[in-house]
Image: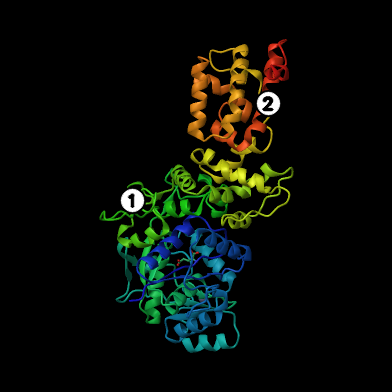
Amino acid sequence: MEIRDRYAPSPTGLQHIGGIRTALFNYLFARSRGGKFILRLEDTDRTRFDPSYVQNLYDTFAWLGLHWDEGPDAGGPAGPYIQSERFELYKKYAAGLVEAGKAYYCFCSPQRLEAVRKEREAAHASETGYDRHCRDLPPAEAARRAEAGEAHTIRLKIPLGGDLPVTRFRDQLLGDIEWKNSDINPDPVLLKSDGFPTYHLANVVDDHLMGISHVLRAQEWLPSTPLHVIMYQAFGWEYPEYCHLPMVMGQDGKKLSKRHGATSIDEFRRQGYLPEALINYVALLGCSYEEGGDFQGEAGLPSRKTGIYTLEELERRFSLDKLNKAPAIFDYKKLEWYNGHYIRMKSDQELAALALPWAAGLFGKSGNLPSRDEGLSAQNGGLPSQGEGKPSPEQWRAFIAAMPLIKERVSFLQEIPAKLEYLFSEPPLPQAEEFIPKKSDLRETIRLLRLGRSLLEPMAGANDQEAEALAKAEAERREVKLGDLLMPLRVAVTGSRVSPPLFGSVRILGAVRCLERADRALAVLEGAAGNSGPSLAERDAQ
Ligand code: GLU
Ligand code: ZN
């Protein structure tokens, strides 16, 4: 059997974690079985539809690097893949069901339906919804009224009594499911009076016509499935394999929602998450990928023990029998950890390009954000375009060179620029106390900074080991602690006691700028000490 599955979003909102998880599992299932993954837009709800949501869908999946084999943009043999372009089909199939006696015309006005609903509610009736008022109209009479133009819907005849009081189907994850027909929405509408299909009709007709073999969807759709199975039976079609995916919960055990944190992929993107991290983490929501043990981790990636998987690996390993029944808990901390991991896996050049959209403030006075696409094209070694808020060639080189300084210290791209501000503009000069190492004093600090200053020139041309050796030798010679020697220098150069590594910073800034910063700091310290000794310039000349 050819495996064909689909992601069938309704473009009525931004793409969010739950939708992405459904799409990813369908994608992985199709890939793991050499099948086809299809995108279908279920845009029958025209009141909540917005074209920006369609754009968001395309942007999100392009960013994630997930592609469908067939879809509105990709084309394919089962198109069109947009439901609003298939309305004639749904009408035809609904009419077919009426003809076969499996569905019927309902002429009830909205007012009548509302009155029935209220009446039943007031009476606390066990049955709610439609009262099947038109179910037994003589078909010939109903057909005449419909043809004469009387407003009507088409409703599915849920089999009642007789030998079909229950509907059974098998769910790949949940096992055998049995549903009393009397518990199913009484004779739901398939075609509305304006000729629009309901979700149920369009979904079933399309899954059939598109040759969908497997429906992997969120568990909230489970109550619709008996109804869908009845429709397949009414059409005389075979229904697909169903697999209702485990729920995704927040850590409080409630369905994941905005209350828990970001849920839309746009938000994660804005915060500086990498697509690799989202894919890796979302793939683990309700599924495991461990297996035999013959797997070799890819270059530099710790393999299965830590749950690090590339998309290719996930494609190889995904299988429905590794799904968990229990709800998955979405852990923002874990996702953050994955993001830090994938940030560390990037080359300096790649990381700089990825961080660029957040870095406008570093490079120019007025922060004009370079677009993400510019950041991405810069990944291929290109230089981002010039202009306000964009780096000069020198700044760009410095930005790339600075990546090793922060790679181990950030979890999000967004954090990177703030940590590197001191490389691109003069950091505000801290108060004198900030420079003073523990158990030291101002006079001693001035001496230490002078010693440190003398190291800047050779340090700027040295690698980390050489710079450290230089500093150690000087500390020994002057009988001071290495940490004490470097603390005032660090504050002078970076503007902070806690900063990215000093040696790398000195290298990137260069001797001239570092000497200027050291002198600026010395002036402050000496001012604070009321130092009346020889001025710096004088001493340098000595
Ligand atoms: N359009 C439905 C949704 O928005 C599709 C459900 C299904 O996969 O059948 O999730
Ligand atoms: Zn009716």
Residue under the point 63% across and 63% down: 52
Disc 2, SS: loop
User: What color scheme is it?
Assistant: rainbow
User: In the image shown, does 90 or 62 lie closer to the viewer?
Assistant: 62
Percent x, y for residue 113? Answer: 54, 69
Note whether residue 146 is visible: yes
Percent x, y for residue 197? Answer: 53, 75
Q: Amino acid at mark 1?
A: Arg
User: What residue is disc 1 on?
Assistant: 304
User: In the image shown, does 435 or 189 lie closer to the viewer?
Assistant: 435
User: What residue is disc 2 on?
Assistant: 429
Precedes in sequence: disc 2 or disc 1: 1
Residue 109 position (above or below residue 245): below
Badge 2 crowding class, 10 Å Cα cut-off, few under 14, some 14 to 19, many 20 or more, is some
Percent x, y for residue 350? Answer: 54, 51
Residue under the point 72% across and 13% down: 534
Position of the C terminus, as image quadrant, is top right
